[in-house]
Amino acid sequence: MASSPNYASTPTVGAAILTAANSGSRTAPVGGQTIFTPGASGAQIERIIIEPVANTVLGTIQIYRVIGGVYYILTEIGIGVQTVSTTVPIAPQTIEAVSQPVLMPLAMPIGSTLYAVRGVAQTGISIQVEGGS
């Protein structure tokens, strides 16, 4: 147990545009992208922001923590039908301690990564991860 508070000293972010569908399984996903890699001392993720960059159909985004090459599913986020417009903004979905207190903040050990994949192919979903190492 630490005798003093341990604060993140380096802001760490990650981002990707997800387009391909998962061509694997829930235990061995294929077609996604690494969206976050912690620093040399590990990291803590505070927020994940998901927002379409084009029209969407019903689907999901699966988020995994990868440790030692093994994929552990953390959560699955539903994506509704949305139409990109120049007059109506699309509201991003945010995963953070307020909306998902069981999941966030998320500890990321040294050597792990965060990986995301679409349930169905789409033109694009922006996913951004904010944390600190």
Image: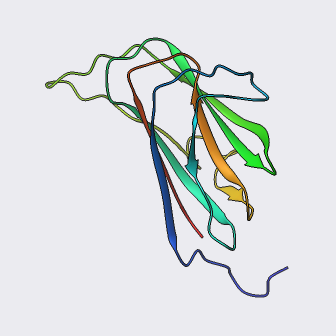
The residue sitting at the right extreme is 1
**Which picture quadrant has residue 2?**
bottom right
Count up the numbered dots.
Answer: 0
Q: In this view, does 109 lie to the left or right of 37?
A: right
23 or 81: nearer the viewer: 23
Query: Residue at point 74% right, 65% down?
Result: 110
Residue 8 to residue 30: above or below: below
Residue 57 to residue 40: above or below: above
Residue 106 to residue 44: above or below: above
The residue sitting at the left extreme is 87
Query: Residue at point 56% right, 41% down?
Result: 99
Colour convention of the picture = rainbow
127 or 16: nearer the viewer: 16
**Which picture quadrant has residue 3?**
bottom right
**Which picture quadrant has residue 56?**
top left
Q: Is residue 1 left or right of residue 108?
A: right
The x, y position of residue 122, in whole percent, is 44, 19
Query: Residue at point 69% right, 67% down?
Result: 42
The x, y position of residue 131, in whole percent, is 54, 61
Query: Residue at point 49% right, 53% down?
Result: 14
Quadrant for the N terminus, please.
bottom right
The x, y position of residue 50, in whole percent, is 45, 36
The x, y position of residue 112, in whole percent, is 72, 55
Quadrant for the C terminus, please.
bottom right
